[in-house]
């Protein structure tokens, strides 16, 4: 898996701080942005995070280039609707030698790994045979596996990212999208450490677990350390 933050709102924390200050000031946005010192920006963003008034976070957006992930992952990812996606198309991109993602539980079992690899080989052969018979790749793709590697560009605003991290950094999240979320979180923390200082699963961010009887037990462990 390769995850890279390729662009974001210039000076995202200043943008958020300026937006928050504008709500209570007669001055214009540009004037406020110029007046705020780095220390004031950090203090104001930290205050907004603590208060949970996150509407101003929506003014900062982040765009990621993601490669080496499966269609299983992207089917889950696009359920996060306040976001923008551009995914590599199997309709136009030929998949004769497609790469595929192997789940850790499969890779750790030699017999399962061999069966998995053999099936991927059969699918490649079927795809090749169909296209050789004149079937367009947009129809031949119906035989492709969920494991097929794909690439996607993802853009989310900071508020949507916080929600995404709460759900997908959770230990109960599916392993591949959890790895993606953790990698994305590491990337945005480099660009905007104050915006994402409290980002993560709800047991970490809010001291609650919404998994009920399926809880991994992390919250209890965190509470015992206090």
Image (tube, rainbow, N blue to C red):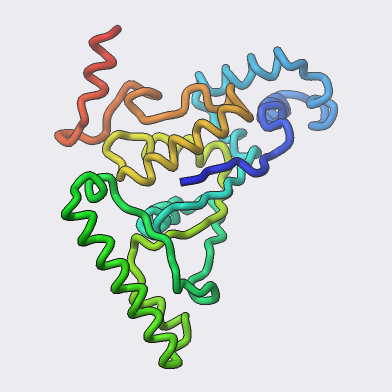
In the displayed orientation, state which residue is furthest to the top: 226
> Residue shown at 45%/74% (left/top)?
96
Left of 201 or right of it: where is 195? right
Q: Is residue 37 visible?
A: yes
* Location of residue 156 in the rendering, given as x and y in whole percent from the top left corner: 56, 45
Q: Is residue 161 above or below residue 113?
A: above
Q: Is residue 167 above or below residue 94?
A: above
* Location of residue 8 in the rendering, given as x and y in whole percent from the top left corner: 67, 40
Q: Quadrant of the C terminus?
A: top left
Left of 215 or right of it: where is 151? right
Q: Is residue 176 above or below residue 120?
A: above
Q: Nearer the viewer, residue 82 or 190?
A: 190
Image quadrant where residue 113 sits: bottom left
* Location of residue 222 in the rendering, given as x and y in whole percent from the top left corner: 28, 16
> Residue shown at 32%/25% (left/top)?
203
Q: Is residue 129 above or below residue 16?
A: below
> Residue shown at 69%/29% (left/top)?
23
Count of marks, rendered view:
0
In the displayed orientation, state which residue is furthest to the bottom: 133
Left of 109 or right of it: where is 39? right
* Location of residue 129 in the rendering, given as x and y in whole percent from the top left corner: 37, 85
Left of 160 or right of it: where is 225? left
């Amino acid at each position: 898996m390769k995850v890279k933050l390729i662009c974001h709102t210039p000076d995202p924390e200043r943008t958020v701080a300026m937006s928050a200050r504008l709500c209570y000031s007669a001055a214009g946005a540009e004037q406020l942005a110029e007046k705020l010192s780095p220390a004031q920006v950090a203090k104001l963003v930290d205050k907004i995070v603590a208060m949970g008034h996150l509407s101003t976070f929506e003014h900062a957006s982040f765009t990621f280039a993601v490669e080496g992930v499966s269609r299983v992952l992207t089917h889950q990812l696009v359920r996060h609707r306040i976001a923008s996606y551009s995914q590599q198309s199997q309709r136009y991109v030929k998949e004769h030698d497609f790469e595929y993602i192997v789940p850790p539980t499969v890779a750790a079992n030699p017999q399962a790994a061999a069966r998995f690899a053999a099936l991927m080989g059969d699918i490649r052969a079927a795809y090749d045979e169909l296209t050789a018979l004149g079937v367009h790749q947009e129809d031949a793709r119906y035989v492709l596996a969920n494991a097929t590697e794909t690439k996607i560009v993802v853009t989310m605003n900071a508020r949507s990212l916080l929600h995404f991290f709460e759900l997908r950094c959770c230990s109960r999240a599916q392993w591949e999208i959890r790895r993606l979320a953790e990698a994305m979180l590491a990337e945005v923390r480099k660009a905007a450490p104050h915006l994402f200082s409290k980002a993560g699963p709800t047991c970490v961010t809010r001291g609650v677990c919404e998994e009920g009887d399926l809880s991994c037990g992390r919250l209890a462990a965190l509470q015992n350390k206090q």
